Image (tube, helix red, strand yellow):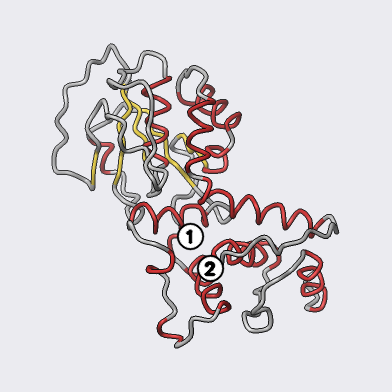
Amino acid sequence: MIYCIWYPSGGFGHFLNGVLTLHGENFVRPKTSTISFGEDGNSHALELTAPKYYHDPVTYDFEFDFAKNYSVLVDNGINNEDTRFLKFFTNATVVKVCYNDQTWPIVANTLIRKAMNSTLENALTVDMWETNADWAIREKYFLFLRDHSLRHAWKVDEQYNCLSIDDIIKYPSLDYYINQHICKVAEFECLHQNWYNTNAVYLKPTAQAKEIIKSIESNVNVPLTHITDFWSQAVVNYYIWITYNFEVPANDYSNWFSSTTEIQKMLKNASYI
């Protein structure tokens, strides 16, 4: 059986490939039995057991042993959700990696750092605003998250096995989904923990933002002075927007928030809660 892992940018495909090829039942194994992660959290160093389907090639030639299972990465880039790859893998099990508004900031960050091999500072400049004030950088990041067309890409499609990034993040959810919907895999919690730790820079801001929204909803005051990087602050502002349909006024809160009570007060004054 061939398992096509169809994914947006960000390293999710290579990680899932590692899970299947190292722990999946009856899969062709790579020569190494462990994954080494790169500085940006990627797992590209793991040998592929079948060639990657890359940017809609004209041909795909590989002699599969159909007594075994294979993982094939379908990498067309985040801008291309075309299914032309299916003509080469007509009977394959397709696993589509999907994201939503809540997990879009994770993909946005990995897109810049991993796929573009850039940094937030270089990719999202404030040159045209003629200021590099803190509020301007934070607002630039927020607008990128709010307005980028790719926020609406890679949605669930019932034709395929759709694995959400929310489920990839949590080991019990990922283990359950793969075993119930894709194939049998042995325990891989250590591999998942290593992946999570090396990709924490992408995952932490959304986890943090979710907890902040919970605190606001529960009327619990939480200090926020420890959140000092502008991307994490922008992700919180983005979560406020997707939750309450309210945009934090960039200039009014140029110093950002010191606690969740300040956010509550802002929303109450604006009659949004």
27 in relation to 124, above or below: above
Task: Using the image, tell me which numbered label, if any, was put on residue 211.
Answer: none
* Quadrant housing residue 245: bottom right
6 in relation to 150, above or below: above
| Residue displayed at 76% across by 69% down | 263
* Quadrant housing residue 244: bottom right
Helix, strand or loop under label 2: helix
The residue pinned by badge 1 equals: 151
Count of labels in the image: 2
The residue pinned by badge 2 equals: 146
| Residue displayed at 66% across by 77% down | 255
Residue 258 rendering spot, x and y as whole percentages: 74, 68
Q: Residue furthest right?
A: 219
Residue 262 rendering spot, x and y as whole percentages: 78, 71
- Quadrant where the C terminus lies? bottom right
In front here: 75 or 162?
A: 75
Number of residues whose C-alpha sits closer than 10 Å to that of mark 2, classed few (under 14), some (14–19) or many (20 or more) = many
Residue 266 falls left or right of residue 205: right
37 in relation to 99, above or below: above
Helix, strand or loop under label 1: helix
- Quadrant where the N terminus lies? top left
Residue 226 falls left or right of residue 84: right
Mark 2 and mark 1 in contact (Cβ < 8 Å)? yes
In front here: 182 or 258?
A: 258
Residue 265 rendering spot, x and y as whole percentages: 82, 73
| Residue displayed at 43% across by 60% down | 150
| Amino acid type indicated by mark 2 | Arg
Residue 13 rendering spot, x and y as whole percentages: 38, 39
Q: Which of the two labelled residues, at mark 1 and mark 2, occupies the earlier sequence position?
A: 2
